[in-house]
Image (cartoon, coloured by chain):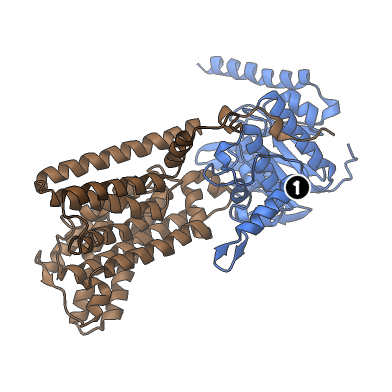
Chain colours: A blue, B brown
Amino acid sequence: MAETTTPDVLRAEHIVKRYGPVTALRDITIHLQKGEILGLIGDNGAGKSTLIKILTGFIPPTGGTIFINGEEVTLRSVTHAHLLGIETVYQDLALVNQLSVYHNMFLNREQIRGPFLNNRKMRQQAREQLDQIGVQIPSIETEVGRLSGGQRQAIAIARAVSTRAKILLLDEPLAAMGAKEGALILGLLRKLQESGEISIIMIAHNYAQVLESCDRVNLLQHGAITLDKPVPETSLEELNELVMREYRLGSAHNSASQ
Amino acid sequence: MAETVLSNAPLPEAEQPPERPQHFWVKAGLFLIRRREASIIIIAIALTVYFGLVTNFVTRENLPIISAYVAADAIVATGEVFVLISGEIDLSVGAVAAFAPFIMYFLTQDGVPLLPSIIVALLVCAGIGLLNGTVTVLLKVPSLITTLGTQFLISGITLIISSGEPIPTPSFGSVNNFLGAANYVEFIWAIAVVIVFQIVLSFTRWGLHTVAAGGNLLGASEAGVAVNRIKIANFVLVSVLGGLAGMLEVFRVGSIDPLANGDGGTYLMFAAVAGAVIGGTSLVGGSGTVVGALLGCLTLSLVQDGLILLGVNANTFDVVLGIAILLAMIANIAITRWRESGK
């Protein structure tokens, strides 16, 4: 991977999130370089989804600063984050099963002609965008609810990059997916990365997939980053060891307090 | 670089193109189940033929009666379709329909011209919709409860301001005809409302976002859709259409009755929801059509009118209608579930 002189497209410093007495994120500092795929791993409840929701403008942080291309920003809303080039693909994909592929791809960004939807234009553009990144589906008119898991994931990613997003946040893109479909999605991400313009943060559970597909990995434990290493400098053993140590400490702590 | 050809991925059975040619009747059957409008038209035709054979159903005297039954139901159902698709329900719209004509009446009695009086009455209805929507969306009270509350509230207010007595609809000459007094006029209003709002539902962002809010509330809001605003707008719409239906009804019937349309409008509301659901609008949100709701209301009205012509006792009639509606609701949920699982 490139030298550390590569500018950070995204940088979040000392992010804190509290829900009343509960602290979800203690003190997170995370950065993303241009053209990089950063893997974000950590156990359930470590705060991965909370962090993603903050970076995408869905919830405000309690404290901390966010920089986009070196400029400090306050993400006011999801739409505001979109304008700054941040797109998120949530675990639930934010797809509406009852709507067609092209309506989903243009959801909240509809092309209109006067008061009416410009369906012809949306169909045409959606088809072009899917062809461009090599996603094939039976028909652009198909209701999304009729597609397979991999196809749905691909539609959601295609929608995110179709907006010329620069920063893509993916919340467990490979969850609940067969090996074959997972490999196709990873191939799609590699292809996006090769275009050079897109930087990706990917939440994942499967460490092997992270090591295979990411350039750098961050481990999130109890609301703080405990490991930040380029993939070549770490290993499956190290990641497993760190997470297992957390378990052992956790259970020791629990039994001590009882 | 591996080609990302997702269509190579194994698909569920139903998505594979049918290998063997299906029998015509099988295809027709599937079409009818998929397109609820088609199946409901067939039911409506069958009912018309049946009642036509056994009673003097299709006559110049009876057709205006059926069209009048359908009209108010269909106007209210149009609004209810929007609310239902966005994943909510409005039980108060019948009470609003009974309430609105009194506002119009008192304003005209105070010397306000008719048109501004109607507009003010509709604005008050919009305010009630705003209240329903805001309480439901912002205070997170289920709409079933919110609108049950406003239904009682509005009915109570109507009884107070009317002293519980019906009053004759004031005459504004031929304007009365235009507002529903003449045969078929209210029906024409209903058709116009249905056409306009079917277009809104199918071809505008409002319609698309209504489906998105009801189909995947969290997902739509994650995509940036203003789901709360859409829901509130739909509550306003159903209330305004309720007010409109109520006012057309008093010009057709000739009296402003606080207990009109079944104990302060509950029957009107119930028929509208039932019509929407019979016409294929999902009770759990995410799908439905205004045209389907019109056909659903037509079917209900055919049954209602046919049973009356058959001389069925009014109490028996409610039992039959209740069972019919209950069966339609059960079928609605079952078909939604079937569609979601079997695809």
Position in image of residue A124 (x %, y %): 69, 54
Q: Left or right of A108: which side holds B249? A: left
Q: Nearer the viewer, residue B239 or B9?
A: B9
Q: Secondary structure under badge 1?
A: strand
Question: Circle 1 sits on which residue?
Answer: A10
Position in image of residue A24 (x %, y %): 58, 37
Q: Chain of mark 1?
A: A
Q: Nearer the viewer, residue A225 or A39?
A: A39
Q: Quadrant of the N terminus of chain B?
A: top right
Position in image of residue A202 (x %, y %): 71, 36
Q: Quadrant of residue A95?
A: top right
Q: Left or right of B111: which side holds B244? A: right
Q: Is residue B97 above or below residue A35?
A: below
| Picture residue at 26% right of the left edge, 54% below the top | B269
| Picture residue at 28% right of the left edge, 57% below the top | B73
Whether residue B138 is visible: no
Q: Quadrant of residue A136?
A: top right
